Image (tube, rainbow, N blue to C red):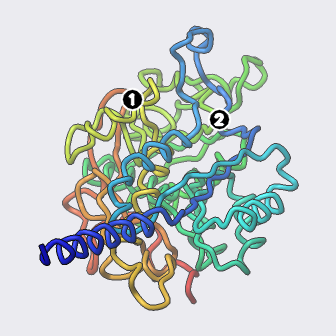
Amino acid sequence: MKIIPLKLGIILLFLSSINSLYANEKEDFNIGYYDLEKDIRYDEWGVHPVDIRSKTNQLYKRPLAGAKLGLKDIKPFQRMAKVKFKLMDMRIKNIDSAADEILNHINKNNIKIVLLDFPASEVINIVSKISDLNIAIINISSKNNELRSVNCNKNLFHTIPSERMLTDSLAQYLSDKKWRKVLILTGPLEIDKAKSASFIESAKQFGLKIVDNRSFLLGNDPRARDQNDLDFLTGSAKYDAVYISDTHGEFSYKVPFATHIPSTVLGSSGLTPRAWHWSYLRHGAPQVHGRFERMNKRRMTEEDWAAWVGMRAIAEALVRFKNNENFSFQDAFVSEEFKLDGSKGPVLNFRKWNRQLRQPIMLSTDNWVTSIAPLESFVHRVNNLDTIGIDSKTSKCGK
């Protein structure tokens, strides 16, 4: 009979420890997600009229879907991290007040870390506005090179690859195939010109020759046929490949198989560099895409993947480093011990100098991954993934 109180005490102690564990689990960890209501990047530019009318055309849905899949996938990490993950998203209506609205939302909801889906110019404004909070920000959609080379910030990390990573990947592929003479076709937008400038830098690095850089225009004005007619645009030059920079895709879709000289087309059409493609069949990618497609009834885009892997990075950092004294995501993300599985093969981590996530790039057509960069023939003294993108020697970040 005397043993009963002892047993009861042990049971109560056990229950108390369990309750304490669950109490710790229920500590909310709020993740902020911000995007624009009217974002031209998600407008249906260059989509065939039949696709626009079709109810199944969901090519331009927002990457918030990727973050929501990430939230679901990191739920098992909650027990180890002793937190309860919450994704708090807000869509900004007025771009002029975006930075102030985000700052207020962060303060009001005790946001611990931010996922940002904004154009480059607004990313800079937002990062500057909330810099005093010393909160880590993950850019999931802007590929702007200057965010990784000139306008860097210790709090700003990038899971989406830079334009330079994408153009370096194409240049590696052309160099490996010995298709060294390239004709560039550049669209009218400033971002088109920036992409072509990035490819020119990549071409220099990998020994390609730019035979010409020609501007194209939309329309059928016969007075401008040297800029809107493909025979004229791609004629009177000798080349192995045509690189086209057309952000809206209204011109580039008709370039493959229509150049004056039979040649490879790449860039905005033909062989396109992407962070992610639904057809990739290795390293657990089909499982990731399958879960996404079941949730959203559409294919996973590279921005979706960047949001998804951003959520995984948050959980990975918390589990590995939360118990460290003076924990911060800024330190955890660039630690030598930080390792991330992005279902693309090699272990991923962030570059210390510009906070860019190292990652392979998928060179793909509309329905197949043709190759993966970096290619095997290109090596780096530290990490082969650093053969694509802005290296520490050329970046102005951290200097």
Work out how far the residue at label 2 is from the one at label 1, CA to CA, in angstroms.
19 Å
Q: Quadrant of residue 332?
A: bottom left
Q: Is 254 in front, or is 146? A: 146
> Which quadrant would the C terminus be assigned to in this image?
bottom right
Task: Name above or below for residue 276 compared with residue 228.
Answer: below
Q: Position of residue 124 (x, y in %)?
A: 72, 66
Q: Is residue 28 left or right of residue 382?
A: right
Disc 2 or 1, which lies upstream in sequence? 2
Going by the numbered disc 2, the residue's amino acid type is Tyr
Q: How many numbered marks, from 0 up?
A: 2
* Residue at x-position 62% and y-position 52%: 88
Q: Position of residue 15 (x, y in %)?
A: 31, 67
Q: Is 356 in front, or is 241? A: 356
Q: Quadrant of residue 36?
A: top right
Residue 241 is tagged as none
Residue 42 is tagged as 2
* Residue at x-position 59% and y-position 46%: 213
Going by the numbered disc 1, the residue's amino acid type is Glu
Bin the neighbour count of mark 2 within 10 Å (Cα to Cα): few under 14, some 14-19, many 20 and up.
Answer: few
Q: Which residue is mark 1?
A: 293
Q: Is 275 in front, or is 379? A: 275
Helix, strand or loop at label 1? It is: helix
Q: Is residue 213 left or right of residue 377?
A: right
